[in-house]
Image (tube, rainbow, N blue to C red):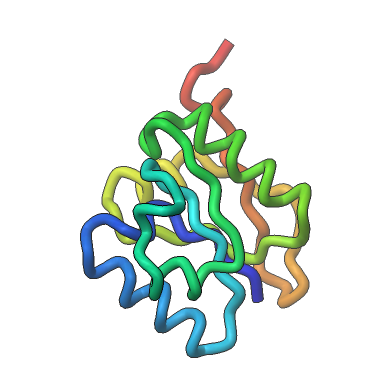
Amino acid sequence: MHVIFVEPRFPNNQRQFVRGLVEAGARVTGIGEVPVEALGQDLHRSLSGYEQIPNVCDEGRLYDAVRRVQQRGWVDRLESTVEWIAYVDGVYARTVAPSRDGEPAYELDPDLYHPA
C-alpha cells in the first residue's frame, strides 16, 4: 500500500503516525512545507519520497503535489491528522477510480471548492 501523508513533521507527533504506517508495511510519501533536510533522519528514512510545497492548506498546491506523486506510481490513500487537511481531503475530493483493494481512490479537486 502506498500512502501520501500530508505534513508528516508537524506537529511533532505526526512522525509516530508515519512510523506506524511503515511498520504496518505501507510505503509513505510525505508532502510538507519544510525542506527535506529539516525532517530529521528518522522521519526522512521512513519516507519513500517527499514533496515540499509552500503551504499545505493551499488546495491548488496540494493538488499539484499529489498529482506529481501519482505520476511516479499508484497511490492508495491520502492521510493527514491535521484538521484542515483532513477537511480538504474529505470535502474536496472526488472518486476517480477504484483502488487495488476495491476502495475508492480519491483525487483532490479544487473546482469543487471554486465552482465555475
Residue 12 on image: x %, y %: 22, 64
Residue 57 on image: x %, y %: 36, 35
36 or 17, which lies in front? 36
* For residue 4, above or below residue 85: below
Left or right: 90 as drawn, with respect to 17: right
Which image quadrant for residue 4?
bottom right
2 or 51, which lies in front? 51
32 or 100, which lies in front? 32
Looking at this rendering, what residue extends furthest in the bottom direction? 24
The quadrant the N terminus occupies is: bottom right
115 or 41, which lies in front? 41
Left or right: 83 as drawn, with respect to 40: left
Residue at 55% of width from left, 43% of height from top? 93
Residue 23 on image: x %, y %: 48, 89
Residue 113 on image: x %, y %: 47, 25
* For residue 84, above or below residue 98: above
Left or right: 56 as drawn, with respect to 63: left
Residue at 41% of width from left, 41% of height from top? 88
Residue at 37% of width from left, 44% of height from top? 34
Residue at 39% of width from left, 75% of height from top? 42
The quadrant the C terminus occupies is: top right
Looking at this rendering, what residue extends furthest in the top direction? 116
Which image quadrant for residue 64?
top right
* For residue 18, above or below residue 82: below
Q: How many marks?
A: 0
